[in-house]
């Protein structure tokens, strides 16, 4: 699902987008002052702590099961209950001791993103809060761990959203990221209708550069779409950054993958056939570039 690290300027989706439901070439340089990231084949040793939850999050689902015989009984694995076992697997400071959570910026299947302010400096960031009650299976928990690991793995790229820190309390995992206040690429496409060839070429270079950088570090994004690209500010020449690595994975060259993930219009046919590699990101990037130039998706019949 889409969880953004910045505001979405368009409240109502329009045209063909309303039905959607579901090369800056770079090599890694100096890493940020963040925990070291282990090789892709291992899970990071990344929190068991308690604090108040962010806005709109409650711990009602952490209480004992209801005695109502008519309610369906859902079996949760121990790590999904997240009382005895943490997600981050390390001690964490309480996010509310460090940040003040503000207005809601975006909503996804698992996470809600808020604007937050660092108490010590007054600097604004984005905080993606992932409710633990939605982490039903061990796989869900591993997905969150992998998302954090991948963001650290890509740290330092100028067109990838920067992670500032990860925190955990009894109700949620909180990812603090840089704030991109320029809105989604999606919204700018809607405002313009389409881009000129020159403007589209500049954005295409950035998008393809992001794909190249991810693949060079063994990361397959798997959910590239205009909603997952944010502008840093409102300026016409604002830097563009990719976000939302919730569906991303580490891949091995030549590996074949079968999980059906992604978003309508942008997902490659090979994903639906359950036999694909990192090339599916190139397909999605191609669809985005087509839309930049034409204002409509390829294969559009409407």
Image: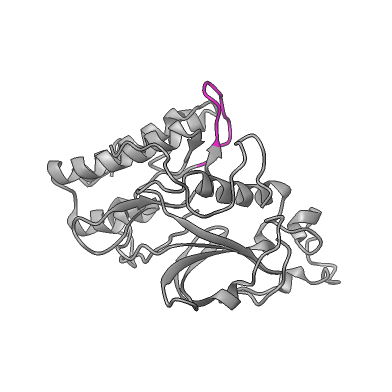
Q: Is residue 301 visible?
A: no
Residue 64: quarter of image: bottom right
Front one among 221 and 50: 50
Residue at 70 percent across and 62 percent down: it is: 91
Answer left or right for 250 relative to 232: right
Q: Which residues are magenta?
A: 250-261
Q: Is residue 139 visible?
A: yes
Front one among 159 and 228: 159
Q: Position of residue 161 (x, y in %)?
A: 42, 53
Residue 40, relative to residue 165: is it above or below?
above
**Prevalent SS, magenta region:** loop
Residue 290, relative to residue 159: is it above or below?
above
Residue 238, relative to residue 257: is it above or below?
below
Total numbered circles = 0
Answer left or right for 252 relative to 265: right
Residue at 35 percent across and 51 percent down: it is: 241
Residue 129: quarter of image: bottom right
**Magenta includes 73?**
no
Q: Position of residue 151 (x, y in %)?
A: 51, 49
Front one among 27 and 116: 27
**Magenta includes 260?**
yes
Residue 132, relative to residue 50: is it above or below?
above
Residue at 54 percent across and 54 percent down: it is: 34
């Amino acid at each position: 699902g889409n969880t953004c690290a910045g505001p979405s300027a368009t409240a109502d989706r329009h045209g063909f987008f309303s039905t959607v439901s579901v090369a800056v070439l770079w090599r890694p340089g100096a890493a940020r002052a963040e925990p070291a990231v282990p090789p892709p084949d291992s899970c990071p040793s990344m929190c068991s702590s308690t604090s108040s939850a962010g806005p709109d999050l409650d711990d009602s689902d952490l209480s004992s099961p209801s005695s109502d015989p008519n309610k369906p009984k859902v079996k949760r694995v121990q790590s999904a209950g997240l009382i005895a076992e943490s997600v981050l697997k390390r001690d964490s400071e309480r996010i509310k001791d460090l940040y003040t959570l503000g207005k809601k910026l975006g909503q996804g299947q698992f996470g809600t993103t808020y604007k937050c302010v660092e108490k010590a400096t007054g600097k604004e960031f984005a905080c993606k809060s992932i409710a633990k009650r939605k982490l039903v299976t061990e796989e869900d928990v591993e997905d969150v761990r992998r998302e954090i690991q991948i963001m650290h793995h890509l740290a330092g790229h100028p067109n990838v959203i920067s992670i500032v820190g990860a925190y955990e309390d009894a109700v949620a995992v909180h990812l603090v990221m840089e704030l991109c206040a320029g809105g989604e690429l999606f919204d700018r496409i809607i405002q313009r209708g389409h881009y000129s060839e020159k403007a589209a070429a500049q954005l295409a270079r950035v998008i393809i550069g992001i794909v190249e950088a991810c693949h060079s570090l063994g990361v397959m994004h798997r959910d590239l779409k205009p909603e997952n690209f944010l502008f840093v500010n409102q300026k016409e020449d604002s830097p563009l950054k990719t976000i939302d690595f919730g569906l991303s994975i580490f891949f091995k060259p030549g590996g074949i993958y079968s999980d059906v993930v992604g978003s309508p219009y942008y997902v490659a046919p090979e994903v639906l056939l359950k036999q694909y590699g990192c090339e599916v990101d190139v397909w999605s990037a191609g669809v985005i570039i087509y839309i930049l130039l034409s204002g409509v998706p390829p294969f559009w019949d409407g």
